[in-house]
Amino acid sequence: MIRRHVMGLAAGLLLGLAPAIGVAQAEPRDLLIFAAASLKTALDEAAASWVKETGKPAPKISYAASNALARQLEQGAPADLFLSADLDWMDYAADKNLIKPETRVTLLANRIALIAPSDSTATIVLAPGLDLSAALAGGKLAMGNVDSVPAGKYGKAALEKLGGWDKVKDKVAQADNVRAALLLVSRGEAPLGIVYTTDAAADPKVKVLATFPEDSHPPILYPVAVTRDSTHSDALGFLTYLRGAGPRAAFEKQGFTVLNKAANAS
């Protein structure tokens, strides 16, 4: 008798809690975006504009190297959008069935540059026969990891094309992402670095010594896609917004070339 009374009481409590539990489960989590570190300044501004224009909650944006983000997706991280700094890592995500391929678009293009601290007096011409040894003066060349980080791969390709890689390959400080490489130069811990021109524009403590010729490395393109497991109602909407006129000014102000200018344009 007592047992039936206890079980009935427990069932009543569960029934009483059911509406509250249902409400909690119905609340959507924040839109989560995985984005290449080089996008931070412009994408933060674009996201703020989206919130202002739509009244929707601000998305959470996780910035890191594209390779690290792709690996996190592979391990089951619950991101809704993936913005990569090169095609290879988006292809990797596609090959692993981590994105919805019908949503994939190439959003932006970028350039890489040789940078130095803002008070540097170095003068360097990026041409065949390049030798950065003298300008390094025993210091390090800051770059993203040349085997995995897109900016590092582009930088190594450009140095190889110009004949300068073998002269500096033992003097490279390889960072986990391009913003970390930028910080090494910004703090004066490295006399030279290779980053995207958009990164250099985001930090007043560095200056661009020269921009690498576009034919010295593969095209620098930024694809974006909704992830395979995303069910967030705003995922595709935010991707579409990024392709429109609203964020264009933020991307172009930072130095990106917008490749979807016609989307949502009048």
Image: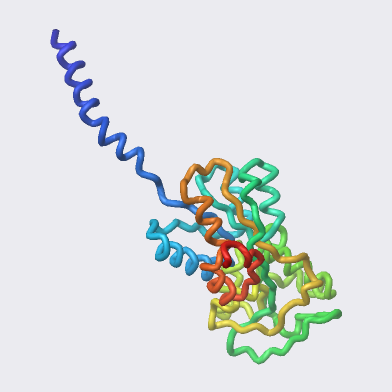
Q: Nearer the viewer, residue 266 or 251?
A: 266
Q: Which residue appears farthest toward the bottom when viewing the image? A: 121
Q: Residue at x 57, y 75 (%)?
A: 254
Give the x, y percent position of residue 137.
Answer: 70, 84
Q: Is residue 29 left or right of residue 6?
A: right
Above or below, 111 against 264 in this view is below
Up-down: is 33 above or below 254?
A: above
Residue farthest toward the front in the current orientation of the protein: 266
The residue at the point 29 percent across, 35 percent down is 21
Q: Position of residue 235 (x, y in %)?
A: 51, 50
Number of numbered discs on residues: 0
Q: Is residue 163 above or below residue 19?
A: below
Image-quadrant location for residue 221: bottom right
What's the residue at 59%, 90% (across, down)? Answer: 119
Frontmost residue, 109 versus 111: 109
Residue lying furthest top in this view? Answer: 1
Task: Name the quadrant containing residue 17.
Answer: top left
Q: Quadrant of residue 115?
A: bottom right
The colour scheme used to paint the residues is rainbow
The C terminus: image quadrant: bottom right
Left or right relative to 66: residue 124: right
Q: Position of residue 264 (x, y in %)?
A: 57, 62
Horizontal placement of 131 versus 253: left or right?
right
User: Considering the image in quadrants, where does the N terminus appear?
Assistant: top left
Which x, y percent locates residue 168?
Answer: 76, 73
